[in-house]
Image: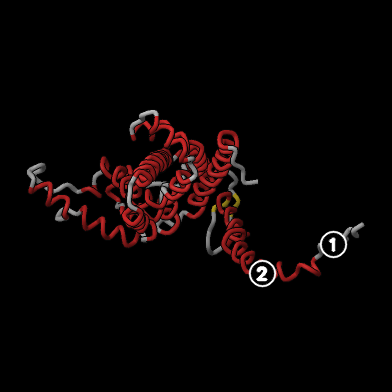
Amino acid sequence: MKKVEKKRKITLKNTWPLHLMLLPGVLVLFTYTILPFFGNIMAFENFQPVLGFFKSKWVGLDNFRYMFMLPDTFKIFRNTLVIAVGKIVFNLVMSVFFAVLLYEMSGKRFKKTVQTICFLPHFLSWVILAMIFRDILDGSGIINMALMKLGIIDEAIVFLGNNKLFQGIIVGTDVWKEFGYGAIIFIAALAGINQELYEAASIDGASRLQKIWNITLPGIKVTVVLVATLNIANVLNAGFDQIYNLYSPIVYDTGDIIDTYVYRMSFESAQYSLATAIGLMKSVVSFLLIVTSNYLARKFANYRIF
């Protein structure tokens, strides 16, 4: 009989090199995530930088009551939801649409070229892209010039200064930037579809559109549901960097979101306690949405993190 090997006891003495490897990551996490968390105490104080956290006057939930009394509160939450939901829905639809089109293309080299071109904008900063879009959408930009040449408009449209157009521009430019990157997971899911199904459909005389509708889309249905449910957690993340670089006071009515409002309250108006209260409220709601999205993903797509 073979000797049964003794199970090695796991102790800090024989695993310290692994803990040492984790130490830099833990320090970064603690410095930039855990430590700033204690700053949320400002939401319950009338915070004065001169007095600091411990000497500022404690006001309890007064900042939250004041937050809900402000007319801007409903507006920023509404704008955040409209823009974030628009981004989630249209990014998902365009990503699936692009993945299916790419899957149906013939010619590997051409497919790779198209995918790479559509994939690249994801890596460009909104600081750079905002400058490009400002030039394109300017009164003397290429779009206005083209529309006037074609006789569609008589005078230039101020795209980034129009409250009716601003949200659509924000959603549209974000979709343009992200749909190529978002399609990667669907391209991977499409690669896992059994090719025999297509062969059987061809024998039965199915057209290409019928194959897409009855084989391709059902084949990635679980992945689409999973991505959609996990995206619920991002409902309150409308994209600070994009909006901050594109908006102006003229479009605050439709372009101001929670993150930009908190930024202005903190660094322009010095209302640190109110800004922290709004940010904390967003964090609590976001946490509930993350829990909900994980529950839905586990229920409908059999996906779990833990």
Q: State the residue position of label 2.
A: 21
| Residue at the (56%, 38%) spot, across then down | 297
- In which quarter of the view is residue 165 placed? top left
Which quarter shows the N terminus? bottom right
Residue at the extreme right: 1
Mark 1 Cα shell of 10 Å, populated few (<14), some (14-19), many (≥20): few
Q: Which amino acid does label 1 sit on?
A: Lys
Circle 2/circle 1 CB separation < 8 Å: no
Give how far across and how far down residue 11 sits, in percent: 81, 64
Q: Taking 9 as reference, is 209 left or right?
A: left
Foreground residue among 194 and 140: 194
In the image, is residue 113 above or below residue 21?
above
- Residue 79 visible here: no
| Residue at the (29%, 52%) spot, across then down | 248
Q: Taking 53 as reference, is 103 left or right?
A: left
Q: Taking 301 as reference, is 220 left or right?
A: left
Q: State the residue position of label 1.
A: 9
- In which quarter of the view is residue 27 placed? bottom right
Give how far across and how far down residue 290 sits, in percent: 56, 43
In the image, is residue 289 above or below residue 131?
above
In terms of secondary structure, where does tag 2 sit?
A: helix
